[in-house]
Protein backbone atom coordinates (compact mmCIF):
# COMPACT_ATOMS: atom_id res chain seq x y z
CA UNK A 1 0.00 0.00 0.00
CA UNK A 2 1.62 3.22 -1.13
CA UNK A 3 1.62 6.13 1.26
CA UNK A 4 0.82 9.27 -0.74
CA UNK A 5 -0.19 12.51 0.97
CA UNK A 6 -2.64 14.81 -0.72
CA UNK A 7 -0.94 17.97 0.59
CA UNK A 8 2.30 18.73 2.44
CA UNK A 9 1.88 18.74 6.20
CA UNK A 10 4.16 19.37 9.17
CA UNK A 11 5.71 16.57 11.19
CA UNK A 12 4.76 16.35 14.85
CA UNK A 13 7.01 17.48 17.64
CA UNK A 14 9.63 14.97 18.67
CA UNK A 15 8.78 14.38 22.31
CA UNK A 16 6.34 12.15 24.14
CA UNK A 17 3.27 13.57 25.89
CA UNK A 18 3.72 13.49 29.66
CA UNK A 19 1.63 14.17 32.76
CA UNK A 20 2.62 17.17 34.85
CA UNK A 21 0.44 17.59 37.94
CA UNK A 22 -3.14 17.77 36.59
CA UNK A 23 -2.14 18.74 33.04
CA UNK A 24 -0.62 17.10 29.97
CA UNK A 25 2.76 18.47 28.90
CA UNK A 26 4.65 18.24 25.63
CA UNK A 27 8.27 19.35 25.17
CA UNK A 28 8.34 21.12 28.51
CA UNK A 29 5.05 23.04 28.27
CA UNK A 30 1.28 22.53 28.76
CA UNK A 31 -0.41 20.57 25.97
CA UNK A 32 -4.06 21.32 25.34
CA UNK A 33 -5.63 19.91 22.21
CA UNK A 34 -8.71 19.88 20.06
CA UNK A 35 -9.08 16.65 18.14
CA UNK A 36 -11.43 14.22 16.43
CA UNK A 37 -12.29 10.55 16.39
CA UNK A 38 -11.11 9.34 13.00
CA UNK A 39 -12.92 6.75 10.89
CA UNK A 40 -9.83 5.19 9.31
CA UNK A 41 -9.66 1.61 10.58
CA UNK A 42 -12.65 -0.33 9.24
CA UNK A 43 -14.71 -0.83 6.11
CA UNK A 44 -14.71 1.55 3.15
CA UNK A 45 -13.22 4.22 5.42
CA UNK A 46 -9.88 2.43 5.20
CA UNK A 47 -9.25 3.34 1.58
CA UNK A 48 -9.31 7.06 2.41
CA UNK A 49 -7.37 7.02 5.66
CA UNK A 50 -4.67 9.39 4.41
CA UNK A 51 -7.14 11.96 3.09
CA UNK A 52 -9.17 11.73 6.31
CA UNK A 53 -6.13 12.56 8.44
CA UNK A 54 -4.94 15.33 6.12
CA UNK A 55 -8.36 17.00 6.23
CA UNK A 56 -8.63 16.50 10.00
CA UNK A 57 -5.28 18.25 10.44
CA UNK A 58 -6.40 21.08 8.15
CA UNK A 59 -9.58 21.40 10.23
CA UNK A 60 -7.52 21.96 13.36
CA UNK A 61 -7.30 18.48 14.85
CA UNK A 62 -4.06 18.02 16.76
CA UNK A 63 -4.93 14.54 18.07
CA UNK A 64 -6.98 11.75 16.55
CA UNK A 65 -8.51 8.76 18.28
CA UNK A 66 -8.54 5.42 16.47
CA UNK A 67 -9.47 1.79 17.16
CA UNK A 68 -6.90 -1.00 17.09
CA UNK A 69 -9.52 -3.67 17.50
CA UNK A 70 -11.89 -5.94 15.61
CA UNK A 71 -12.93 -9.46 16.59
CA UNK A 72 -14.90 -12.12 14.74
CA UNK A 73 -15.70 -15.82 14.69
CA UNK A 74 -15.29 -16.63 11.01
CA UNK A 75 -18.96 -16.28 10.14
CA UNK A 76 -18.50 -12.76 8.78
CA UNK A 77 -18.26 -12.06 5.07
CA UNK A 78 -14.77 -12.33 3.60
CA UNK A 79 -14.78 -8.58 3.05
CA UNK A 80 -15.58 -7.88 6.70
CA UNK A 81 -13.06 -10.43 7.92
CA UNK A 82 -10.38 -8.41 6.18
CA UNK A 83 -10.99 -5.53 8.59
CA UNK A 84 -10.73 -7.62 11.76
CA UNK A 85 -7.61 -7.95 13.87
CA UNK A 86 -8.68 -11.37 15.06
CA UNK A 87 -10.99 -14.12 13.79
CA UNK A 88 -11.33 -16.46 16.73
CA UNK A 89 -8.98 -16.66 19.71
CA UNK A 90 -6.03 -17.71 17.55
CA UNK A 91 -6.97 -16.30 14.13
CA UNK A 92 -4.73 -13.24 13.88
CA UNK A 93 -5.09 -11.08 10.76
CA UNK A 94 -1.71 -9.54 9.95
CA UNK A 95 -3.23 -7.30 7.25
CA UNK A 96 -5.15 -5.36 9.91
CA UNK A 97 -1.97 -4.83 11.91
CA UNK A 98 -0.15 -3.64 8.79
CA UNK A 99 -2.95 -1.17 8.12
CA UNK A 100 -2.43 0.17 11.65
CA UNK A 101 1.28 0.57 10.79
CA UNK A 102 0.28 2.67 7.75
CA UNK A 103 -2.12 4.80 9.80
CA UNK A 104 0.54 5.60 12.39
CA UNK A 105 3.07 6.46 9.68
CA UNK A 106 0.61 8.71 7.85
CA UNK A 107 -0.40 10.44 11.09
CA UNK A 108 3.22 11.28 11.80
CA UNK A 109 3.68 12.74 8.31
CA UNK A 110 0.60 14.97 8.52
CA UNK A 111 1.35 16.16 12.05
CA UNK A 112 -1.29 14.25 14.02
CA UNK A 113 -0.87 12.40 17.27
CA UNK A 114 -3.09 9.42 18.06
CA UNK A 115 -4.92 7.88 21.00
CA UNK A 116 -5.16 4.14 20.29
CA UNK A 117 -8.09 2.11 21.69
CA UNK A 118 -7.48 -1.57 22.40
CA UNK A 119 -10.99 -3.03 22.82
CA UNK A 120 -14.67 -2.13 22.64
CA UNK A 121 -17.53 -2.64 25.11
CA UNK A 122 -20.03 -2.78 22.26
CA UNK A 123 -20.53 -5.37 19.54
CA UNK A 124 -19.23 -3.08 16.76
CA UNK A 125 -16.60 -5.18 14.97
CA UNK A 126 -16.91 -7.85 17.65
CA UNK A 127 -15.98 -6.19 20.92
CA UNK A 128 -16.38 -7.69 24.37
CA UNK A 129 -19.50 -9.63 23.25
CA UNK A 130 -17.30 -11.52 20.77
CA UNK A 131 -14.69 -12.30 23.43
CA UNK A 132 -17.47 -13.88 25.47
CA UNK A 133 -18.85 -15.69 22.43
CA UNK A 134 -15.44 -17.30 21.94
CA UNK A 135 -15.82 -18.60 25.49
CA UNK A 136 -19.20 -20.16 24.82
CA UNK A 137 -21.37 -17.13 25.35
CA UNK A 138 -21.59 -17.57 29.12
CA UNK A 139 -22.16 -14.50 31.26
CA UNK A 140 -22.85 -10.86 30.52
CA UNK A 141 -20.54 -8.06 29.41
CA UNK A 142 -19.40 -7.61 33.01
CA UNK A 143 -17.99 -11.15 32.93
CA UNK A 144 -15.19 -9.89 30.69
CA UNK A 145 -13.54 -8.16 33.65
CA UNK A 146 -13.48 -11.19 35.96
CA UNK A 147 -13.28 -14.35 33.81
CA UNK A 148 -9.60 -15.46 33.70
CA UNK A 149 -10.09 -16.84 30.18
CA UNK A 150 -11.39 -13.52 28.84
CA UNK A 151 -8.59 -11.68 30.59
CA UNK A 152 -6.01 -13.99 29.00
CA UNK A 153 -7.49 -13.39 25.53
CA UNK A 154 -7.38 -9.64 26.02
CA UNK A 155 -3.81 -9.71 27.35
CA UNK A 156 -2.66 -11.48 24.19
CA UNK A 157 -4.19 -8.75 22.02
CA UNK A 158 -2.51 -6.06 24.13
CA UNK A 159 0.86 -7.75 23.78
CA UNK A 160 0.52 -7.97 20.01
CA UNK A 161 -0.54 -4.34 19.53
CA UNK A 162 1.46 -2.49 22.18
CA UNK A 163 4.54 -4.64 21.66
CA UNK A 164 4.46 -4.35 17.86
CA UNK A 165 7.25 -3.09 15.59
CA UNK A 166 5.98 -1.19 12.54
CA UNK A 167 6.50 -2.86 9.17
CA UNK A 168 6.53 0.63 7.59
CA UNK A 169 9.01 2.55 9.75
CA UNK A 170 10.81 -0.29 11.52
CA UNK A 171 10.14 1.54 14.81
CA UNK A 172 8.63 -0.16 17.84
CA UNK A 173 5.30 1.35 18.83
CA UNK A 174 6.70 2.00 22.29
CA UNK A 175 9.26 4.35 20.73
CA UNK A 176 6.86 6.22 18.44
CA UNK A 177 5.88 9.69 19.78
CA UNK A 178 2.98 9.76 17.30
CA UNK A 179 1.07 7.81 19.95
CA UNK A 180 -0.31 9.93 22.79
CA UNK A 181 -1.74 7.11 24.85
CA UNK A 182 -3.26 3.64 24.98
CA UNK A 183 -6.94 3.35 25.90
CA UNK A 184 -7.83 0.02 27.50
CA UNK A 185 -11.43 -0.25 26.31
CA UNK A 186 -13.98 1.94 24.57
CA UNK A 187 -16.84 3.02 26.86
CA UNK A 188 -16.39 0.63 29.75
CA UNK A 189 -19.47 0.18 31.93
CA UNK A 190 -20.51 -2.35 34.57
CA UNK A 191 -23.27 -2.82 37.10
CA UNK A 192 -22.60 -1.55 40.62
CA UNK A 193 -21.76 -4.91 42.15
CA UNK A 194 -19.09 -5.55 39.50
CA UNK A 195 -17.23 -2.26 39.97
CA UNK A 196 -14.59 -3.84 42.29
CA UNK A 197 -13.78 -6.57 39.73
CA UNK A 198 -13.40 -4.02 36.95
CA UNK A 199 -11.16 -1.87 39.12
CA UNK A 200 -8.84 -4.81 39.68
CA UNK A 201 -8.87 -5.40 35.91
CA UNK A 202 -8.02 -1.75 35.25
CA UNK A 203 -4.98 -1.85 37.53
CA UNK A 204 -3.79 -5.17 36.13
CA UNK A 205 -4.14 -4.12 32.47
CA UNK A 206 -2.63 -0.67 33.04
CA UNK A 207 0.38 -2.36 34.63
CA UNK A 208 0.70 -4.68 31.63
CA UNK A 209 0.63 -1.82 29.12
CA UNK A 210 3.20 0.18 31.12
CA UNK A 211 5.42 -2.89 31.30
CA UNK A 212 5.28 -3.30 27.52
CA UNK A 213 5.56 0.44 26.85
CA UNK A 214 6.97 2.77 29.53
CA UNK A 215 6.93 5.77 27.17
CA UNK A 216 3.23 6.32 26.61
CA UNK A 217 0.26 7.23 28.79
CA UNK A 218 -2.59 4.88 29.69
CA UNK A 219 -6.25 5.69 30.29
CA UNK A 220 -9.32 3.53 30.89
CA UNK A 221 -11.80 4.41 28.16
CA UNK A 222 -14.61 5.07 30.62
CA UNK A 223 -18.17 5.65 29.41
CA UNK A 224 -18.48 8.39 32.02
CA UNK A 225 -21.13 9.17 34.59
CA UNK A 226 -24.70 10.39 34.67
CA UNK A 227 -25.68 9.81 38.29
CA UNK A 228 -24.16 10.46 41.71
CA UNK A 229 -23.24 6.80 42.21
CA UNK A 230 -21.62 6.51 38.78
CA UNK A 231 -19.73 9.72 39.52
CA UNK A 232 -18.13 8.26 42.64
CA UNK A 233 -17.16 5.08 40.75
CA UNK A 234 -15.68 7.15 37.90
CA UNK A 235 -13.44 9.09 40.29
CA UNK A 236 -12.28 5.95 42.12
CA UNK A 237 -11.57 4.12 38.84
CA UNK A 238 -9.38 6.94 37.53
CA UNK A 239 -7.50 7.16 40.81
CA UNK A 240 -6.30 3.60 40.13
CA UNK A 241 -2.57 3.01 39.96
CA UNK A 242 -1.28 3.08 36.37
CA UNK A 243 -4.03 5.31 34.97
CA UNK A 244 -2.34 8.53 33.85
CA UNK A 245 -5.33 10.70 33.00
CA UNK A 246 -9.12 10.68 33.26
CA UNK A 247 -11.41 10.41 30.29
CA UNK A 248 -15.11 10.86 29.74
CA UNK A 249 -17.56 10.65 26.84
CA UNK A 250 -20.21 13.32 26.62
CA UNK A 251 -23.40 13.06 24.58
CA UNK A 252 -25.67 15.54 26.34
CA UNK A 253 -28.80 14.21 24.65
CA UNK A 254 -30.51 12.03 25.76
CA UNK A 255 -28.42 10.78 28.69
CA UNK A 256 -27.72 14.24 30.08
CA UNK A 257 -30.56 16.35 28.73
CA UNK A 258 -29.75 20.00 28.15
CA UNK A 259 -32.38 22.70 28.39
CA UNK A 260 -30.02 25.58 27.66
CA UNK A 261 -26.70 25.76 25.86
CA UNK A 262 -24.93 26.76 29.09
CA UNK A 263 -25.88 23.39 30.59
CA UNK A 264 -23.07 21.94 28.46
CA UNK A 265 -20.53 24.08 30.30
CA UNK A 266 -21.97 23.02 33.67
CA UNK A 267 -21.56 19.34 32.82
CA UNK A 268 -18.03 19.82 31.51
CA UNK A 269 -16.90 21.90 34.49
CA UNK A 270 -18.11 19.30 36.98
CA UNK A 271 -16.09 16.59 35.27
CA UNK A 272 -12.98 18.73 34.96
CA UNK A 273 -13.09 19.83 38.57
CA UNK A 274 -13.64 16.26 39.76
CA UNK A 275 -10.59 15.15 37.78
CA UNK A 276 -8.31 18.03 38.74
CA UNK A 277 -9.31 18.64 42.34
CA UNK A 278 -10.30 15.18 43.58
CA UNK A 279 -8.56 12.61 41.38
CA UNK A 280 -5.77 15.14 40.74
CA UNK A 281 -5.15 14.02 37.19
CA UNK A 282 -5.72 15.63 33.77
CA UNK A 283 -8.92 14.90 31.89
CA UNK A 284 -9.57 14.35 28.18
CA UNK A 285 -13.07 14.25 26.72
CA UNK A 286 -12.52 11.32 24.39
CA UNK A 287 -15.85 11.67 22.58
CA UNK A 288 -18.19 14.65 22.41
CA UNK A 289 -21.07 14.45 19.96
CA UNK A 290 -24.21 16.31 18.99
CA UNK A 291 -26.91 15.63 16.42
CA UNK A 292 -28.92 18.21 14.54
CA UNK A 293 -31.99 17.08 16.47
CA UNK A 294 -30.16 17.86 19.73
CA UNK A 295 -29.68 21.42 18.60
CA UNK A 296 -33.25 21.93 17.49
CA UNK A 297 -34.60 21.02 20.91
CA UNK A 298 -32.99 24.13 22.43
CA UNK A 299 -33.18 26.40 19.34
CA UNK A 300 -29.43 26.26 18.70
CA UNK A 301 -27.25 25.12 15.81
CA UNK A 302 -25.21 21.95 16.02
CA UNK A 303 -22.07 24.02 15.43
CA UNK A 304 -23.14 26.28 18.29
CA UNK A 305 -23.29 23.30 20.65
CA UNK A 306 -19.80 22.22 19.62
CA UNK A 307 -18.53 25.79 20.04
CA UNK A 308 -19.86 25.87 23.61
CA UNK A 309 -18.29 22.49 24.39
CA UNK A 310 -14.90 23.53 22.97
CA UNK A 311 -14.98 26.79 24.91
CA UNK A 312 -16.08 25.14 28.13
CA UNK A 313 -13.39 22.44 27.98
CA UNK A 314 -10.62 25.00 27.59
CA UNK A 315 -12.07 27.39 30.14
CA UNK A 316 -12.50 24.69 32.79
CA UNK A 317 -8.95 23.40 32.30
CA UNK A 318 -9.44 20.11 30.44
CA UNK A 319 -6.41 18.67 28.66
CA UNK A 320 -8.24 17.89 25.42
CA UNK A 321 -11.54 17.33 23.66
CA UNK A 322 -12.27 15.14 20.63
CA UNK A 323 -15.38 15.40 18.47
CA UNK A 324 -17.28 12.33 17.23
CA UNK A 325 -16.98 11.30 14.42
CA UNK A 326 -14.78 12.58 11.53
CA UNK A 327 -15.06 10.55 8.31
CA UNK A 328 -14.98 10.64 4.51
CA UNK A 329 -18.02 11.98 2.63
CA UNK A 330 -20.42 9.41 1.24
CA UNK A 331 -20.02 6.93 4.10
CA UNK A 332 -23.56 6.16 5.32
CA UNK A 333 -23.98 6.94 9.00
CA UNK A 334 -27.10 7.91 10.83
CA UNK A 335 -25.75 9.91 13.74
CA UNK A 336 -23.09 12.42 14.72
CA UNK A 337 -21.19 12.43 11.43
CA UNK A 338 -18.68 15.17 10.58
CA UNK A 339 -17.81 14.59 6.93
CA UNK A 340 -14.89 16.30 5.24
CA UNK A 341 -15.01 17.39 1.62
CA UNK A 342 -18.50 17.52 0.15
CA UNK A 343 -20.17 17.10 3.52
CA UNK A 344 -23.45 18.50 4.76
CA UNK A 345 -23.84 22.14 5.73
CA UNK A 346 -23.91 21.00 9.35
CA UNK A 347 -20.53 19.27 8.95
CA UNK A 348 -19.01 22.35 7.31
CA UNK A 349 -20.11 24.52 10.24
CA UNK A 350 -18.79 22.08 12.84
CA UNK A 351 -15.43 21.86 11.08
CA UNK A 352 -15.24 25.64 11.12
CA UNK A 353 -15.72 25.55 14.90
CA UNK A 354 -12.97 22.92 15.21
CA UNK A 355 -10.56 25.23 13.37
CA UNK A 356 -11.61 28.18 15.51
CA UNK A 357 -11.07 26.21 18.73
CA UNK A 358 -7.71 24.91 17.51
CA UNK A 359 -6.43 28.44 16.89
CA UNK A 360 -6.93 29.15 20.59
CA UNK A 361 -5.39 25.90 21.75
CA UNK A 362 -1.84 27.28 21.57
CA UNK A 363 -2.77 29.45 24.56
CA UNK A 364 -3.28 26.27 26.57
CA UNK A 365 -6.19 25.64 28.91
CA UNK A 366 -7.55 28.44 31.04
CA UNK A 367 -6.97 27.42 34.62
CA UNK A 368 -9.03 28.96 37.38
CA UNK A 369 -7.13 29.71 40.61
CA UNK A 370 -7.84 27.13 43.31
CA UNK A 371 -8.40 29.75 46.01
CA UNK A 372 -11.67 31.55 46.43
CA UNK A 373 -13.72 28.93 44.62
CA UNK A 374 -16.70 27.16 46.18
CA UNK A 375 -16.03 23.65 47.47
CA UNK A 376 -16.44 20.88 44.94
CA UNK A 377 -19.90 19.43 45.32
CA UNK A 378 -22.23 17.52 43.04
CA UNK A 379 -25.95 17.83 43.49
CA UNK A 380 -27.71 15.15 41.43
CA UNK A 381 -29.67 16.89 38.74
CA UNK A 382 -33.01 15.21 39.19
CA UNK A 383 -35.41 15.24 36.30
CA UNK A 384 -38.77 16.10 37.78
CA UNK A 385 -41.98 15.58 35.87
CA UNK A 386 -45.35 16.73 37.13
CA UNK A 387 -48.75 16.69 35.45
CA UNK A 388 -52.23 17.51 36.74
CA UNK A 389 -53.54 14.23 35.36
CA UNK A 390 -55.90 12.36 37.65
CA UNK A 391 -57.04 8.88 36.67
CA UNK A 392 -60.80 8.43 36.68
CA UNK A 393 -60.50 4.71 35.99
CA UNK A 394 -61.95 3.94 39.42
CA UNK A 395 -65.05 6.00 38.69
CA UNK A 396 -65.57 4.18 35.42
CA UNK A 397 -64.77 0.71 36.69
CA UNK A 398 -67.48 -1.88 37.07
CA UNK A 399 -68.22 -2.47 40.71
CA UNK A 400 -69.60 -5.61 42.18
CA UNK A 401 -71.03 -5.62 45.68
CA UNK A 402 -67.60 -5.87 47.32
CA UNK A 403 -64.81 -4.78 44.91
CA UNK A 404 -63.69 -2.03 42.55
CA UNK A 405 -60.72 -3.03 40.37
CA UNK A 406 -59.04 -0.80 37.80
CA UNK A 407 -55.68 -0.15 36.12
CA UNK A 408 -53.74 3.10 35.66
CA UNK A 409 -51.38 3.06 32.64
CA UNK A 410 -47.70 3.31 33.55
CA UNK A 411 -47.30 6.37 31.37
CA UNK A 412 -50.24 8.21 33.05
CA UNK A 413 -47.94 9.59 35.74
CA UNK A 414 -48.95 12.59 37.78
CA UNK A 415 -45.38 13.06 39.04
CA UNK A 416 -41.95 11.43 38.95
CA UNK A 417 -38.44 12.26 40.15
CA UNK A 418 -35.27 10.48 39.02
CA UNK A 419 -31.76 11.42 37.93
CA UNK A 420 -32.71 10.02 34.51
CA UNK A 421 -36.11 8.89 33.33
CA UNK A 422 -38.26 8.25 30.32
CA UNK A 423 -40.90 6.11 28.67
CA UNK A 424 -39.78 3.31 26.35
CA UNK A 425 -41.98 1.97 23.58
CA UNK A 426 -40.24 -1.21 22.49
CA UNK A 427 -41.07 -3.84 19.86
CA UNK A 428 -43.04 -6.94 20.75
CA UNK A 429 -42.73 -9.17 22.66
CA UNK A 430 -41.32 -6.66 25.15
CA UNK A 431 -43.91 -4.38 26.78
CA UNK A 432 -43.64 -0.60 26.88
CA UNK A 433 -42.62 0.83 30.25
CA UNK A 434 -41.88 3.93 32.29
CA UNK A 435 -38.31 3.88 33.61
CA UNK A 436 -36.16 5.81 36.07
CA UNK A 437 -32.51 5.33 37.03
CA UNK A 438 -30.95 4.70 40.44
CA UNK A 439 -32.97 6.51 43.14
CA UNK A 440 -36.37 8.19 42.78
CA UNK A 441 -40.10 7.59 42.48
CA UNK A 442 -43.14 7.34 40.24
CA UNK A 443 -46.50 8.71 41.35
CA UNK A 444 -50.04 8.23 40.07
CA UNK A 445 -53.16 10.08 41.22
CA UNK A 446 -56.67 8.65 41.02
CA UNK A 447 -60.20 9.55 42.08
CA UNK A 448 -62.49 7.07 43.90
CA UNK A 449 -66.28 7.01 44.44
CA UNK A 450 -67.79 7.49 47.91
CA UNK A 451 -67.57 4.57 50.28
CA UNK A 452 -65.03 3.30 52.79
CA UNK A 453 -63.02 0.20 51.73
CA UNK A 454 -61.61 -2.22 54.27
CA UNK A 455 -58.56 -3.21 52.19
CA UNK A 456 -56.48 -1.84 49.32
CA UNK A 457 -54.26 -3.97 47.08
CA UNK A 458 -51.73 -2.74 44.51
CA UNK A 459 -49.87 -4.76 41.92
CA UNK A 460 -47.54 -3.94 39.03
CA UNK A 461 -45.08 -5.67 36.75
CA UNK A 462 -41.68 -4.17 37.52
CA UNK A 463 -37.96 -4.71 37.13
CA UNK A 464 -34.79 -2.82 37.91
CA UNK A 465 -33.46 -0.35 35.33
CA UNK A 466 -29.76 -1.14 35.18
CA UNK A 467 -28.18 -1.89 32.87
CA UNK A 468 -30.90 -3.14 30.51
CA UNK A 469 -31.91 -6.53 29.20
CA UNK A 470 -28.39 -7.86 29.77
CA UNK A 471 -28.55 -7.05 33.50
CA UNK A 472 -26.25 -9.32 35.50
CA UNK A 473 -27.77 -11.42 38.29
CA UNK A 474 -28.18 -9.35 41.42
CA UNK A 475 -29.08 -6.02 39.82
CA UNK A 476 -32.36 -5.88 41.70
CA UNK A 477 -33.95 -2.82 43.29
CA UNK A 478 -35.87 -2.30 46.53
CA UNK A 479 -39.36 -0.89 45.92
CA UNK A 480 -41.44 0.84 48.57
CA UNK A 481 -45.17 1.45 47.98
CA UNK A 482 -47.17 4.17 49.69
CA UNK A 483 -50.68 5.59 49.39
CA UNK A 484 -51.29 9.19 50.44
CA UNK A 485 -47.90 9.22 52.15
CA UNK A 486 -48.59 6.10 54.23
CA UNK A 487 -46.23 3.20 53.57
CA UNK A 488 -48.08 -0.03 52.76
CA UNK A 489 -45.27 -2.41 51.90
CA UNK A 490 -42.01 -3.14 50.14
CA UNK A 491 -40.79 -5.62 47.53
CA UNK A 492 -37.80 -6.36 45.32
CA UNK A 493 -37.80 -5.60 41.60
CA UNK A 494 -36.13 -8.37 39.57
CA UNK A 495 -33.10 -7.68 37.30
CA UNK A 496 -34.07 -5.92 34.10
CA UNK A 497 -34.95 -8.52 31.47
CA UNK A 498 -37.28 -6.30 29.45
CA UNK A 499 -40.34 -8.08 30.90
CA UNK A 500 -40.29 -7.76 34.70
CA UNK A 501 -42.22 -9.68 37.35
CA UNK A 502 -45.33 -8.89 39.40
CA UNK A 503 -45.04 -7.33 42.85
CA UNK A 504 -48.06 -6.93 45.14
CA UNK A 505 -48.77 -4.70 48.14
CA UNK A 506 -51.79 -4.82 50.47
CA UNK A 507 -52.95 -2.79 53.45
CA UNK A 508 -55.81 -2.66 55.96
CA UNK A 509 -54.38 0.30 57.87
CA UNK A 510 -57.39 2.12 59.45
CA UNK A 511 -55.74 5.53 59.09
CA UNK A 512 -55.16 4.96 55.40
CA UNK A 513 -58.59 3.45 54.75
CA UNK A 514 -60.26 6.46 56.35
CA UNK A 515 -58.63 8.61 53.68
CA UNK A 516 -59.84 6.34 50.89
CA UNK A 517 -63.50 7.04 51.49
CA UNK A 518 -63.71 9.41 48.51
CA UNK A 519 -61.78 12.07 46.64
CA UNK A 520 -58.23 12.10 45.26
CA UNK A 521 -55.55 9.60 46.27
CA UNK A 522 -51.82 9.41 45.46
CA UNK A 523 -49.95 6.14 44.93
CA UNK A 524 -46.16 6.15 44.89
CA UNK A 525 -43.62 3.46 43.97
CA UNK A 526 -40.22 4.52 45.22
CA UNK A 527 -36.64 3.22 45.06
CA UNK A 528 -35.00 4.53 48.25
CA UNK A 529 -31.38 5.67 48.48
CA UNK A 530 -29.68 2.37 49.30
CA UNK A 531 -26.64 0.45 47.98
CA UNK A 532 -28.89 -1.92 46.03
CA UNK A 533 -30.84 0.87 44.29
CA UNK A 534 -30.80 0.18 40.57
CA UNK A 535 -33.76 2.17 39.30
CA UNK A 536 -37.20 0.97 38.33
CA UNK A 537 -39.22 -0.02 35.27
CA UNK A 538 -43.01 -0.19 35.50
CA UNK A 539 -44.43 -2.12 32.56
CA UNK A 540 -47.78 -1.69 30.89
CA UNK A 541 -50.65 -2.22 31.57
CA UNK A 542 -49.36 -0.25 34.56
CA UNK A 543 -50.53 -0.01 38.15
CA UNK A 544 -53.46 -2.25 39.08
CA UNK A 545 -55.56 -1.17 42.05
CA UNK A 546 -58.20 -3.13 43.89
CA UNK A 547 -60.44 -1.66 46.59
CA UNK A 548 -62.36 -4.17 48.69
CA UNK A 549 -65.50 -3.06 50.54
Image: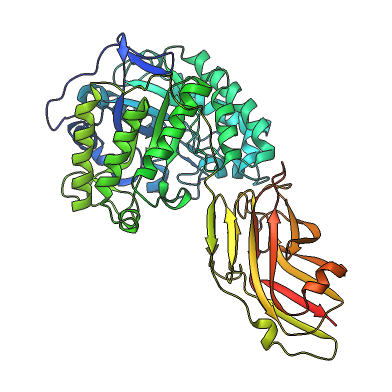
- Quarter-wise, where is residue 316 in the image? top left
The quadrant of the image that shows the N terminus is: top left
Q: Which residue is drawn at 51% across and 19% down?
A: 209
Residue 270 location in percent, x, y? 46, 34
- Compare residues 209 and 343 and report the one nearer the observer: 343
Of 4 and 400, nearer the camera is 400
> Residue 15: where, in percent of width, then height?
31, 11
Q: Residue 504 location in percent, x, y?
A: 80, 66
Relative placement, left or right, of 90 versus 341 is right
In the rendered image of this protein, does residue 171 appear above or below residue 527? above
- Above or below, comparing residue 113 to residue 499 in the picture: above
- Is 12 in front, or is 495? 495
Q: Which of 152 and 62 is in front in this view?
A: 62
Rendered location of residue 218, percent (x, y): 47, 22
Q: In this view, does 364 lie to the left or right of 345?
A: right
Confirm whether residue 217 shows in the render.
yes
Amino acid sequence: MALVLAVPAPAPAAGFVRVHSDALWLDGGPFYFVGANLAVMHGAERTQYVETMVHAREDGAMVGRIWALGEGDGTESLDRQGYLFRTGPDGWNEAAFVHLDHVLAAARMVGLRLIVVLSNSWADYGGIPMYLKWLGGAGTTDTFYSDPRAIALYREHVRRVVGRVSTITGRAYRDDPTIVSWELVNESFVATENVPARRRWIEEMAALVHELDPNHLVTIGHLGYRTARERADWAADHAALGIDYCDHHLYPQPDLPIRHIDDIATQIEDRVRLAREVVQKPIVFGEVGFEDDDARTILETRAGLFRRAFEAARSAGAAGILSWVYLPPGIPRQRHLIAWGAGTASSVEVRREMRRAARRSWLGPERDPPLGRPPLAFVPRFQIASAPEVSVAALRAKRDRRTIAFAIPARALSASRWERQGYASVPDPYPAHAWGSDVGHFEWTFAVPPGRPHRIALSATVSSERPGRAAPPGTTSPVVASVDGIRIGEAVAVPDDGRGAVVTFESSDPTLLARLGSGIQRVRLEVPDAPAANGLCVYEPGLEVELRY
